[in-house]
């Protein structure tokens, strides 16, 4: 486990660095390889929604065995780069799921709380960290709270307070960072960083969100893009198909990436 432990340490250091960690989410071996070949890539993150869509499942409904098989293929495809996996809500047993993910080479993960009772969510974080320790891997948990995306119609200040309360509890239970998905403006981001600490907040780059550099200036540790990278790729494919149906041609700038 020494090599895998080293990858986990590297991933943790990337989260702790002053520079924001930018991870471009992938969904299969070839998308992972294409991103991994870029010199700017320091780590790889999978997108659970995108992997599920690849196999024809709705988000959150893909069987764990299928998800882990693809995640393992991604780990193999990217070689020495550390891989953080999207493990949904832990597939009913977060500790065991993380143990199995470590078995295919993963060194970090997003696991969402889906606004479960706080005591249950903290117990899940503790089980994940314990699973990593048992396997000899200092697991890098980007603990996700759905305080904003599942907050329903409650006032934004209630979602903000909930995200901070949950995030502090997850950090106290061993999480490396707290992932708060949602379209976060500068004021909300600043409040989250004030509540969680500099270098402890992870965000998603939605259309209309702040830039990575702007989030970095506010003290954010990590930015990822979830299923949006696959949507961009599929948009390009559909646009190409439309052009080819109109008697177009494959662009000469096309690169061989597989």
Image (tube, rainbow, N blue to C red):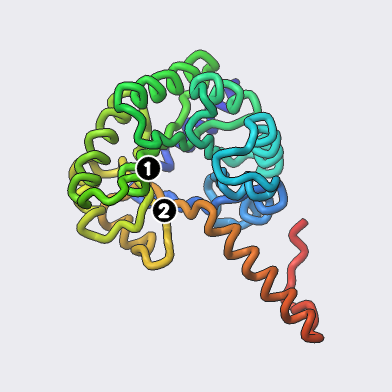
User: Circle 2 — which element?
Assistant: strand
- Determine which quarter of the picture holds residue 206: bottom left
**On screen, residue 30 above or below 84:** below
Q: Are marks 2 and 1 in contact (CB under 8 Å)?
A: yes
Q: Is residue 40 left or right of residue 170?
A: right
Residues 212 and 151: in front is 151
Near mark 1 (Cα within 10 A), the count class, few <14, some 14-19 or many ≥20, is: many
Report the Cα–Cα distance between label 2 and label 1: 8 Å
Residue plotted at (32% across, 23% down): 173
Does residue 32 show up?
A: no
Is residue 75 visible in the rendered image? The answer is: yes
Residue 204, which numbered label? Answer: 2
Q: Residue at x 20, y 45 (%)?
A: 158
- Please name the residue shown 74% across and 68% down the image: 255
Nearer to the camera, 27 or 93: 93
Where residue 214 sits: x, y (%)?
31, 62
Q: SS at mark 1?
A: strand
Which quadrant of the figure contains the N terminus? top right
- Give the image quarter of residue 170: top left
Residue under label 1 = 179
Question: What residue is at 39 percent from the left and 38 percent from the top?
Answer: 144
């Amino acid at each position: 486990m020494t090599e895998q432990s080293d990858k986990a340490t590297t991933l943790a250091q990337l989260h702790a660095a002053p520079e924001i960690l930018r991870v471009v989410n992938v969904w299969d071996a070839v998308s992972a390889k294409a991103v991994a070949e870029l010199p700017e890539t320091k780590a790889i993150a999978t997108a659970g929604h995108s992997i599920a869509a690849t196999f024809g499942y709705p988000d959150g409904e893909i069987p764990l065995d299928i998800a882990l098989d693809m995640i393992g293929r991604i780990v193999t495809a990217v070689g020495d780069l550390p891989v953080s996996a999207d493990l949904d809500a832990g597939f009913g047993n977060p500790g065991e799921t993380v143990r199995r993910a470590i078995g295919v080479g993963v060194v970090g993960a997003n696991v969402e709380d889906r606004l479960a009772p706080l005591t249950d969510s903290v117990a899940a974080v503790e089980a994940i960290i314990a699973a990593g320790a048992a396997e000899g891997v200092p697991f890098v948990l980007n603990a996700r709270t759905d305080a904003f995306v599942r907050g329903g119609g409650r006032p934004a200040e209630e979602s903000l307070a909930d995200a901070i309360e949950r995030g502090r509890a997850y950090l106290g239970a061993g999480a490396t960072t707290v992932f708060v998905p949602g379209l976060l403006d500068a004021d909300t981001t600043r409040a989250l960083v004030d509540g969680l600490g500099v270098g402890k907040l992870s965000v998603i780059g939605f259309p209309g969100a702040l830039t990575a550099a702007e989030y970095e200036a506010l003290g954010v540790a990590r930015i990822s893009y979830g299923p949006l990278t696959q949507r961009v790729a599929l948009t390009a494919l559909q646009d190409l198909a439309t052009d080819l149906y109109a008697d177009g041609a494959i662009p000469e700038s096309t690169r061989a990436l597989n």
